[in-house]
Image: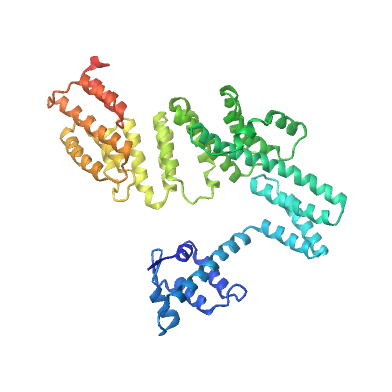
C-alpha cells in the first residue's frame, strides 16, 4: 500500500467537480493516455482500489491491465500522470472561477498577437463592467489594478501617449492603495510576533512603516479626495490603533468601529469581515498581556466580528469563536446576552458539535448564576464520546456537587477524574499540572470540611495561592468559607 496525493485531491472534490474532472481527463487536449482514463474511472466512479489516503497498486493494476503481470513502474507512472492532471484541474478550476483574471489574460493574449480590434472591444466592455462596481474590497482593487496595468502595457508598446498616461494615472492610484493595505496587514502580523517577543529574522515591515509619515499621507488623501480613501481609512485606523500611544489608539479604534457600523459604507461586507478579524487578533494579543484591561474591548470586538460572520465564506461558526464569546459574556456578567447567544449561535456550529455545545453553554451559564442543579442536569445530557472539552465539564460537575453538599458523589468523581487526567493524551505540561492541582485541592477541601486531614485551611490557602490550579479563584473562595477569618 502506497501513500498517495491523488486520493487526497479526489476526496476534496464535490460530485459536480468529480464529473467535471472526468470530462477534463477525457479531453485529448489535456490527456491522451487511455490507461490514465481507466484509473480515474475506477477511483472516481467505483471507489475501488483505495482506503483512506492509500492505494492498492496490485488491485488497480489488475483492473487496468487485466491478466498482464504486475509491474510497479507502470502503476507509479499512471499515478504520477493522474496526479499531475488533478493538480492541473485544480488550477484550471481556480482560473475559470476568477473571471477577472481570465479577462486580463485574454487582453494580454490579444495584445501579444496584435489583435487590436479584439483587444479594444474587450478593454471597453470589461472596463465598463469594472466601473459599474461601486463597493470596495481588496479583490476588486487587484482586478482594477491588473486591468490598468494591461492597458499601460498595450498603449506603451504603441506609443499612444494620451491613453497611456490616463492608464498610468489610474494604475498608480490603485497600486498606492494596494501597497498600503498590504503593508498594514503585514504590519499587524509582525507587530503581534514582536509583541510576544517572538524571534523573527530580518523583516522590514515594522522599521519601514515606523519611518513613513502616515499622518501626512492620510492628510494628502483627504485633501485630494482620494477615490479609494474609504478602504484605506479603515486599514489606516486599524494600523494606528496598533501603532499609536494608548490615548490615540482608543480614538482610532473607535473611528474604525464607526466605519464598520456605517450602513452606507462602500466597503464590501466580506472585506469588513477581514478587517474585523484583524481587529480581534491584535486586541487578543494585548488581552494576553493584560486580560483585565482588554477583556471588555476584546468582547466588543468579537461582537463586531460575529455580526459580520455570515460574510466569512465559512459554512459553520468556528468552535473557538463560540467558546471565546461565551466565556467573555459570562465573565463580564452579560447573562441575558449569553443566554441569547447560546440559543441563536449553537445551531450555527457543525452538526456534530451543536447539541453538546448547546448544553456546554447552558452548563457554564447556570454555574455563573449559581443554579447548580441545572448544571448537573445539562451536564448529564452531554455525549462525552463526541465532546472535545471533557475536562471543562468535569470541573463544573465537581464544583456543583461541592456547592450542593453532595460530597460522596464529589469524592467519587475526584477518583475517576484522577484516572482521566492520567490517561488523557491531550493533557500536556502545565495544562495537566493545572487540572491535577485542581482535583487534589478540591479533595483537600472536602477532607478539611469533615476533619479527614491535618492540613488547615490556612495551609491549603497558601498551597492554592502558589499553585497553577485551574479554577483557582473558586478554590480560594471555598477555602475562605471554611475559615472566614482567612479573608
Where residue 113 appears, as percent x and y from the top left, is 78, 65
Please, which residue is most extreme toward the front here? Answer: 202
Residue 358 lies, in percent from the top left, at: 37, 43
Question: Which residue lies at the image location 26% right of the left edge and 37% below the top edge?
Answer: 397
- Image quadrant of residue 373? top left
Residue 374 visible somewhere in the drawing:
no
Q: Position of residue 223 (x, y in %)?
A: 77, 31
Judge whether 128 appears above or below 309 on screen: below
Q: Is residue 194 left or right of residue 459?
A: right
Direction from residue 329 to residue 117 in the image, left or right: right
Work out whether 106 lies above or below 302.
Answer: below
The C terminus lies in which quarter of the figure? top left
Pick whichever, 383 or 99, lies toward us.
99
Using residue 354 as the reference point, say whether residue 190 is left or right of it.
right
Q: Nearer the viewer, residue 34 or 283?
A: 34
Q: In the rendered image, which quarter is residue 215 located in?
A: top right
Q: Nearer the viewer, residue 346 or 249?
A: 249
Q: Is residue 33 above or below residue 298?
A: below
Looking at this view, name the residue that lies furthest to the bottom: 67
Q: Quadrant of the N terminus?
A: bottom left
Closest to the observer: 143 or 269? Answer: 143
Residue 328 in view of the camera: yes
Point 22% across, 23% down: residue = 460
Q: Give the residue drawn at x 44%, y 37%.
A: 325
Residue 188's x, y, as percent? 57, 36
Amino acid at each position: 500500500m502506497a501513500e498517495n496525493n491523488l486520493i487526497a485531491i479526489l476526496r476534496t472534490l464535490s460530485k459536480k467537480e468529480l464529473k467535471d474532472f472526468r470530462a477534463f481527463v477525457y479531453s485529448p487536449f489535456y490527456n491522451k493516455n487511455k490507461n490514465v482514463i481507466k484509473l480515474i474511472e475506477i477511483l472516481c466512479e467505483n471507489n475501488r482500489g483505495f482506503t483512506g489516503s492509500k492505494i492498492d497498486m496490485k488491485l488497480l493494476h489488475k483492473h487496468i491491465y487485466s491478466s498482464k503481470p504486475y509491474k510497479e513502474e507502470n502503476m507509479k507512472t499512471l499515478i504520477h500522470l493522474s496526479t499531475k492532471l488533478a493538480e492541473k484541474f485544480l488550477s484550471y478550476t481556480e482560473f475559470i472561477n476568477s473571471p477577472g483574471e481570465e479577462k486580463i489574460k485574454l487582453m494580454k493574449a490579444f495584445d501579444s498577437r496584435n489583435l487590436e480590434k479584439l483587444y479594444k472591444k474587450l478593454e471597453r466592455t470589461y472596463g465598463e463592467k469594472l466601473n459599474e462596481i461601486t463597493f470596495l474590497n481588496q479583490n476588486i482593487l487587484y482586478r482594477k489594478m491588473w486591468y490598468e496595468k494591461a492597458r499601460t502595457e498595450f498603449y506603451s508598446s504603441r506609443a499612444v501617449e494620451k491613453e497611456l498616461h490616463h492608464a498610468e494615472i489610474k494604475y498608480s492610484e490603485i497600486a498606492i492603495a494596494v501597497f498600503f493595505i498590504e503593508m498594514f496587514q503585514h504590519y499587524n502580523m509582525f507587530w503581534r510576533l514582536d509583541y510576544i517577543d517572538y524571534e523573527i529574522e530580518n523583516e522590514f515591515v515594522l522599521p519601514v512603516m515606523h519611518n513613513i509619515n502616515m499622518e501626512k499621507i492620510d492628510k494628502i488623501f483627504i485633501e485630494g479626495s482620494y477615490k479609494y480613501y474609504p478602504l484605506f481609512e479603515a486599514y489606516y485606523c486599524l494600523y494606528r490603533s496598533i501603532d499609536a500611544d494608548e490615548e490615540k489608539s482608543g480614538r482610532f479604534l473607535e473611528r474604525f468601529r464607526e466605519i464598520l457600523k456605517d450602513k452606507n459604507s462602500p466597503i464590501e461586507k466580506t472585506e469588513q469581515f477581514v478587517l474585523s478579524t484583524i481587529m480581534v487578533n491584535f486586541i487578543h494579543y494585548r488581552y494576553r498581556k493584560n486580560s483585565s484591561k482588554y477583556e471588555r474591548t476584546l468582547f466588543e470586538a468579537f461582537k463586531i466580528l460575529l455580526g459580520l460572520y455570515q460574510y466569512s465564506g465559512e459554512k459553520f461558526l468556528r468552535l473557538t469563536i463560540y467558546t471565546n464569546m461565551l466565556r467573555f459574556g459570562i465573565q463580564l456578567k452579560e447573562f441575558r446576552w449569553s443566554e441569547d447567544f447560546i440559543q441563536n449561535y449553537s445551531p450555527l456550529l457543525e452538526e456534530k458539535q451543536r447539541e453538546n455545545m448547546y448544553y456546554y453553554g447552558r452548563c457554564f451559564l447556570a454555574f455563573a448564576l449559581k443554579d447548580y442543579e441545572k448544571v448537573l442536569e445539562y451536564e448529564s445530557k452531554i455525549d462525552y464520546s463526541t465532546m472535545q472539552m471533557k475536562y471543562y465539564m468535569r470541573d463544573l460537575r465537581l464544583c456543583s456537587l461541592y456547592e450542593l453538599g453532595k460530597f460522596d458523589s464529589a469524592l467519587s468523581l475526584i477518583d475517576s477524574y484522577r484516572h482521566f487526567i492520567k490517561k488523557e493524551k491531550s493533557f500536556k505540561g502545565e495544562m495537566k499540572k493545572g487540572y491535577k492541582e485542581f482535583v487534589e485541592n478540591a479533595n483537600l477541601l472536602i477532607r478539611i470540611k469533615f476533619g479527614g486531614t491535618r492540613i488547615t485551611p490556612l495551609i491549603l490557602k497558601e498551597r492554592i495561592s502558589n499553585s497553577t490550579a485551574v479554577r483557582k479563584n473558586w478554590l480560594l473562595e471555598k477555602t475562605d468559607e471554611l475559615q472566614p477569618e482567612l479573608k
